[in-house]
Amino acid sequence: MRRFIALAVLTSSFVVTLVFALVGRTIWRRRRGSTGRILVTGRFDNLNWFLSHATPLSRSGVGEVIVVSESPQGGVPRVRFSCPPPLVLRVLGRALGKLLWMVAVAVRYRPDVVMGYHLFPGALTALIVGRLIGRPACYQMTGGPIEIIGGGYQNENKLMKSLSRPSALVERLAVAVVREFEMVVVRGSGAKGALVDRGIGDAVEIITGSIDTPAMTQGAKRCWDMVFIGRLTEIKQPEQFVSIVAAVARDLPDVRAICVGEGPELPAIRSRAESLGVAGNIEFAGQSDDVPGVLKRSKVFVLTSRSEGLSIAMVEAMGHGLPVVVADVGDLGDVVEAGVNGWVIPPNDIDAYARRVLELLTDEAMWLRSSRAACETAGAFTADRVAERWRDCFEGLVHNGAGFWGRIPDGRQCET
């Protein structure tokens, strides 16, 4: 029954979006004066993730970024929030409520670009709104190709997960919808290749999230040997981190690890730590407001995800001088150079993870070389560098000349 409902809802959603996209094709080409605004919607998992994407957008030369979300995420200059009233969301549901609110905001402010994070429902909303107001739409494929492969059944989206197995119909409809976007943004070459294989290539751009340039603390005491940072959900596979700690502890009984994050998998990984005898080796820190402080005191970053786009947590760790040992999934291999700034590991190979972590923890010269290389790699992901990439793409997408980049209004932080 869950699969049937998911098929019905997803199929109808994609079909309706396609109808809007096809009917509105001639509308978006109409030339209008630029407002210098971008309208954005989507699911924002945490404040740090939001800032990593909103900050370079705000510095790209655009006048204002308006974000439609259920609640404000944090203050960024030239970024403000337009939040639907809770009553609207309760009565209409979150997806429909945000869609109608997006339409109202778009009609009022006439953005130059409408952007959605994650295909369903954020990007679908952006495409419908873009066609209605005659502006180009951008899809940010933050989760990688699993957002469309098999209809998204491996995705974290609850409705898509309810498919439980691949759906060729939903995938075909998803691909058809993605072809309608004027720009599709992915995080690396792997995601772009997956889209090219499905006949989507001309509109695809590679743009990552960003990090703050960390102020490195020379000689800081690194008291944690291993660190995991992320949502404690099934797709991140945090139980594997516990298994890796246990494998390392066979050679280094005093190894210290910290797990930063919250989520439904927390009770299971605590239990696993107890059963493997490493509960005393792992600190479960929960959600932290001082992730940079944790990274400055850690030695090796470990990522065990089943799927990724490009992990901002990983890049942030590299910026703080941590070599990384990560699963060879998504676009992580675009950043991690084996034996230089870290290692990419065949997914789910606990012994391979443990072997590489042990090499870094027991060979100080290797750790220092890898630490310096990791810092150098992270320099390409600063907000200003990513903002330059956005500026280039927007200048090609919005055919209004300097008007798009001229006016920089004062940004208000929240409109409700």
Image (spheres, rainbow, N blue to C red):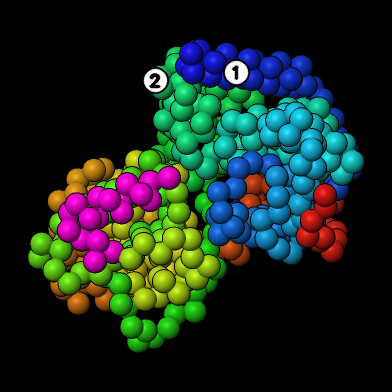
Q: Label 2 belongs to which residue? A: 165
Closer-to-camera residue (279/30): 279
Query: Which residue is found at the position 26% from the left and 43% from the top?
Result: 347
- Residue 198, position in %: x, y? 47, 23
Sequence-wise first label, 1 or 2: 1
Closer-to-camera residue (156/54): 156
Residue 140 in view here: yes
Mark linked to residue 184: none
- Residue 29, position in %: x, y? 80, 29
Lateral position of residue 397 relative to residue 328, left or right: right
- Residue 187, position in %: x, y? 49, 46
Q: In 3D space, how far apart are the residues under numbered discs 1 and 2 (Cα atoms)? A: 16 Å
Q: Quadrant of residue 55?
A: bottom right
The amino acid type of the residue labelled 2 equals Arg
Q: Residues within 10 Å of mark 2 (few under 14, many from 20)?
A: some
Which residue is the extreme one toward the bottom? 219
**Extent of the magenta region:** 264-282
Q: Residues within 10 Å of mark 1 (few under 14, many from 20)?
A: some
Q: Quadrant of residue 183?
A: top right
Q: Mark 2: which secondary structure?
A: loop
Q: Quadrant of residue 338?
A: bottom left
Residue 343 in view here: no
Closer-to-camera residue (374/8): 8
